[in-house]
Structure formats: C-alpha cells, structure tokens
C-alpha cells in the first residue's frame, strides 16, 4: 500500500462556540489548509471540537474535502477525522470516505495519522486506488 507523507499549514480557523455549559465547550470550526509533499493541494474542513473546561482534554470529529494531487494523480476526496488528547497524549487519525474520490483519485481508500508538533503539522496517508 503506497504511503503519502508531507506537511500542511492551517490557512484559516473560524471557531463558533455553540455550547459553553459546565464541563466542556463545544465549538463548530471551519478551516482551510494547504498541503505540501506527496499530497499537494488545498482543503476545506468542518469539525466539531469539545474542550474540557480545565483544558487538559479535548476531542474533535469532522470532515475535510481535499482538492489536489496524490503522488501526481489529480482529483478530490473526503477525509473523516477523529482525534482525542489528554494530559499531553494525543491521537489524530483520518480515514478516506470510500467512493468519495474523483478524477484520477476515483476509487481511493485508506487512512492515516496527523501529527501536531506545537502547531507544525505533518501527516501520513496509506492508500490504495482500486
């Protein structure tokens, strides 16, 4: 299974808290990104975040539409995000929505991880085209 790796930058971050009750704040966030490396392109992402009021734990889930190239193949696909963090430990993963690929990326499927190192984001995506 091929692996695509690289970095991305968050170009915009638009949080809109909608539930600030005791325990955790729930926020809708719309963001845009630019990818470099084996994935080259841009994306729009919408996530729901939950951040504990004591700010030692957080989680998010959402969807991202990537537009660009993967190892030179052009198209789009949708990623499903799942992430949690607690006391400095975190897990950020993504899965390609099956059948969401277009163009030369039609049939793409797979998943991978995101690493956030104090705001510097890197990723890997293991995928197959079929």
Image (tube, rainbow, N blue to C red):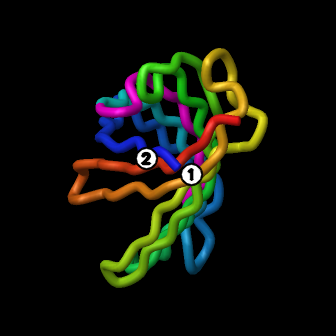
Q: Quadrant of residue 22?
A: bottom right
Mark 1: few/some/many CA within 10 Å (<14, 14-19, 20+) = some
Q: Are marks 2 and 1 in contact (CB under 8 Å)?
A: no
Q: Secondary structure at mark 1?
A: strand
Any magenta on residue 7? Answer: no
Instruction: Name the residue nearer the viewer: 62 or 110.
Output: 110
Q: Quadrant of residue 20?
A: bottom right
* Image quadrant containing the C terminus: top right
Q: Residue at x 52, y 64 (%)?
A: 83
- Residue at the spot of label 1: 17
Magenta segment's dominant SS is: strand
Numbered label attached to residue 27? none
Q: Residue 56 appears at what percent x and percent y?
A: 38, 79
- Residue at the spot of label 2: 3
Q: Quadrant of residue 60?
A: bottom right
Q: Residue at x 59, y 48 (%)?
A: 47
Mark 2: few/some/many CA within 10 Å (<14, 14-19, 20+) = some
Label 2 and label 1: CA atoms lie apart by 36 Å
Q: Residue furthest right?
A: 99
Say which of marks 2 and 1 sits in front: 2
Q: Residue 71 appears at what percent x and percent y?
A: 42, 28
Residue numbers of the magenta segment: 37-49
- The correct choice, above or below, for 50 with respect to 74 in the image is below
Q: Residue at x 47, y 22 (%)?
A: 69
Sequence-wise first label, 2 or 1: 2
Q: Residue 8 appears at what percent x and percent y?
A: 33, 37
Any magenta on residue 39? Answer: yes
Q: Residue at x 56, y 45 (%)?
A: 127
């Amino acid at each position: 299974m091929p692996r695509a790796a690289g970095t991305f930058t968050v170009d915009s971050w638009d949080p809109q808290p909608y539930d600030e009750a005791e325990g955790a704040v729930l926020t809708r966030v719309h963001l845009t990104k630019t990818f470099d490396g084996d994935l080259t392109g841009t994306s729009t992402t919408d996530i729901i975040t939950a951040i504990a009021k004591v700010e030692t734990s957080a989680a998010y889930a959402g969807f991202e539409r990537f537009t660009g190239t993967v190892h030179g193949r052009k198209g789009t696909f949708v990623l499903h995000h799942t992430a949690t963090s607690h006391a400095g430990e975190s897990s950020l993963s993504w899965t390609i929505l099956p059948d969401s690929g277009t163009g030369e990326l039609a049939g793409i499927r797979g998943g991978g991880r995101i690493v956030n190192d104090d705001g510097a984001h890197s990723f890997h995506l293991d995928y197959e085209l079929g």
